[in-house]
Image (cartoon, rainbow, N blue to C red):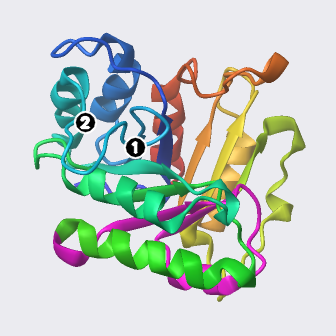
Amino acid sequence: MAAVAGTGILVPLYIYPGDAPTCSAWQPLLNAIHANPFVPFTVIVNPDSGPGGAPGAQPDASYQGCVPLLAAHANVRTVGYVPTHYGARSAADVDADIGAYAGWDAAYAPEGIFFDEVEPTSEFLALYTSFAGTARASFAGGDGLVFLNPGASVQDDGFFAIADQIVTAEDYYSDFSPSQLSLRSSSPASKQAVILHDAPSSPPTSLLSQLVSDGIGSLYISDDTQANNGNPYDSFPSDLSSLAAALGADS
């Protein structure tokens, strides 16, 4: 039996799926997942910069029909997107978003929460500890996933104690170097994720090999662009399957 890759793919799925059951806009992702069963995928589900409804509301028919196609694969776990506005968003609103995802039917409910726009300083550690505790308690029988995205290194390693993974680099491909990551026992590589955009269209083999060798938990490298204030996550990498295959080969 093939070994499970040590470094997975963290997918910002900020793309509407299209009508179920075809879910045509998500097919590149579904194809990559199917073709690389030993590469772990964590998929960030994001209907509308959050769950798109109050607690008790269900997502629209497309999400109800398409998210189960992701969850049907053993190498996939899903997390719901929740913005925190760098600690400025009210705790009640953040908790309401967590509750909304937790109220989704089991067939398409996520397994935890991806907190975006995280303020990674000691001043805010207690706030995010509270958010993380709510998320863990709300999913997977009290063992929900917690992902944090400050997009840069954290200033207090206490954040690693409350998260499964932290996005410690979200940047242009050309501005990133693995040397900027702080890899030590209190900020382990396995709990760090890297998201890069404006990358070359083919997977950058040397960079992938370095990140896998370092033991990085997850990555996402895309040639989608942020030019002219664009959205670098409104399309998939040109060859997502090759990116996944390269991770499987390097692990």
Q: Quadrant for residue 171, please give it.
A: top right
**Residue span colored magenta:** 141-168
- Looking at marks 1 and 2 on the same chain, the residue that comes earlier in the sequence is marked by 1
Question: Residue at the location (40% across, 43% down)?
Answer: 43
Q: Which class describes the residues within 10 Å of circle 2: few (<14), some (14-19), or many (20+)?
A: many
Residues tagged 1 and 2 counted as in contact (Cβ below 8 A): yes
Image position, residue 1 (x, y; %) = 22, 55
Image position, residue 183 (x, y; %) = 72, 76
Q: Is residue 199 left or right of residue 84?
A: right
Nearer the observer, 3 or 135: 135
* Residue type at the position of mark 2: Leu
Residue on which the image places disc 2: 70
Question: Residue 144: within the magenta?
Answer: yes
Q: Is residue 135 left or right of residue 165?
A: left
Residue on which the image places disc 1: 43
* Residue type at the position of mark 1: Val
Question: Residue 146: within the magenta?
Answer: yes
Q: Quadrant for residue 228, please give it.
A: top right
How much space separates mark 1 and mark 2, taking CA atoms? 8 Å
Image position, residue 90 (x, y; %) = 55, 62
Question: Residue at the location (45% across, 27% down)?
Answer: 241
In the image, farthest residue toward the right: 175
